[in-house]
Image: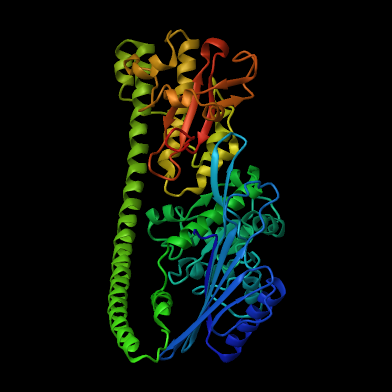
Amino acid sequence: MSLGYRTILTTEATVDHLNTILEVFRTWLSNRKGFESVPTQGKTFNSAGAQLKTSQYQIGATSAFRWELVEDWDAPRWYKNSATSRRGVTHITLVYTPGLLWVWADVEPPTLDYVDSSHRARSELQPAGTPAFVRTLIDQLPLRDGLAEPLSDFQLVISALHVEELIRVVQDDTRLGAVYVSATPLNGNPEEWRTKSQKMVGAIQGMGIGYVLSPEATKAFNLASGFSHRVPAGGMRTFLPGAQFDDPSDSYNHKLLHPSSLQTGDERRIGRIIRSAQVARLGSTRLPRLLRDVDYEFLRMERLKPFESLPVVSDAEDKQLLDAVNVALVEKLKKAEADALQFLEDNYSQQDDIDLLQLEVDDLSRDVAQNYAELNGARDQIDYLRKQLLNLGNAEGTAAAFAPVPDDARTGYPKTFAELVDQVSNLDGVAFFGNKSDTEELDSHASLGETVVMKAWDAILTFSAYVAARNEGLFDSGLRAYVGQSQHGLQMRISQAKWGEGEIVRSNDALIAQRTVTGVPTAVAESGSIVMVAHIPLATHRANSPRLYFADTYSDAKMVCIGHIGGHLDNVSTN
């Protein structure tokens, strides 16, 4: 199963703290989950059939307790697929060591399989929320995540004097959760923005910590963090552990939600994006060494359980046979233990390699983004100089070929897909009729990066340039010819386009329904709907392999219609 929630927190290892945690947990199991008692070892069930399993062990000065709660979750009211499993699993692990007490909780919710209103098959985790006992523990104990206190509410940083402590938290590489730093909009009220920020991010208790900067604190924070790590007024940045303000390239690791996204976006969608990204990151983050060792020990105990007890026989011959079986079982057990240990060691080693490769990929991604921007800067210059030469056609034109490109001739790229959707309306000859939420959700996939936004924007700029060329009489064929005949010298930034779908897609009503876009002008289609099969791959084997679907409707309405910018639509391999 996949994670829907994770928290890993610490506090001072005292008997009082341990007893508080156990009491909070027992109360939660009794009042909220209906268990009459909590066993110190073994299994118990409640009246609804939920199972609670308790395990514990002690090695040296380290004591560990683990509870596994397996229960059926209620489905959302709108969910009608009764065939899917409703099983959810909650793991709670306590580790008591000299000086430090660890609280580790994982929630694995059921999966929701359904077909959405666009006839696309969806498979997603049921929202897990924050377990009530975690919220209670945060309120009752001085828990910490690294240097930070995981308070339930967003904290308001009013004065520049308190920014120094926030910076220590942001730069702390020992914490595991994210830090959300939101800056009050210009002329905004910090208290009102704190309420809005908290509502947008939602229930992140135990997974992240939120701060809201007043205008004064925003200036102090941005002065200390530098241009690359700044938080603009009305924006929010998600700081992962160990921010490095002296390294501008490190800013790519700490995703920025731009002011336009926060002020105009749907709060529930933003919260879902933020939470999903944090859960995914925590699920892939390597556990602290102590917790890895504890986890392995519990797994080893599970392997031992089948061999804990064997039947007692009185017959000597049967006992002799049983002894032989015991020897064989012990040998198998030893081999299973050795294999399990080797697997875990190999897995940890592979994780180290994966972490290193991820760093290399991040570096390459930044290089690609920079090269892509430089390449398009050169394209801007070529387009501009060509126009100058065509207009002048003389010696002055030759001189103009070496002129610097004016700022208004350069392409200004949106930073996010949310910005991209908003900016499409400012272009002539292009109209977006797709689901805005599908497009904005791409911003939750950090693996896509800004280059994918740039690629989509280049395609849309090409659509606009194509319509302008048709209007001005500079080109007299369709968009497919415009893209395929780049020797025309006009603006063209589409490197790859697919102009149709396979026969299986075309003959499948459900798949065609996904590619049917409604709300188009009657000049395009009297019914107000049109099927779009031409598309541009924006990324492959990353995130959900997003695509941009479009239709050349210049002959009917003198524009290009865009119908979908979002995840890969179903086809024969996914249907």
Left/right of residue 440 with respect to residue 487 in the rendered view: right
Left/right of residue 54 with respect to residue 469 in the rendered view: right
Q: Is residue 111 above or below residue 454?
A: below
User: Residue 243: where, in percent of width, then height?
Assistant: 44, 62
- Give 295 or 388, whichever is nearer the viewer: 295
What residue is shown at x 43% (from left), y 16% (from top)?
479
Q: How many marks?
A: 0
Q: Is residue 37 above or below residue 261?
A: below
Q: Visible in this render: residue 362?
A: yes
What residue is shown at x 61% (from left), y 90% (from top)?
16
Q: Visible in this render: residue 102?
A: no
Q: Quadrant of residue 298?
A: bottom left
User: Residue 323: where, in percent of width, then height?
Assistant: 31, 86
Q: Quadrant of residue 336?
A: bottom left
Q: How is the image coloured?
A: rainbow
Q: Is residue 565 above or below residue 169?
A: above
- Give 196 or 530, whichever is nearer the viewer: 530
User: Residue 127: where, in percent of width, then height?
Assistant: 61, 56
User: Residue 188: where, in percent of width, then height?
Assistant: 69, 52
Q: Is residue 156 above or below residue 397?
A: below
Left/right of residue 292 with respect to residue 418 in the rendered view: left
What residue is shown at x 49% (from left), y 70% (from top)?
168
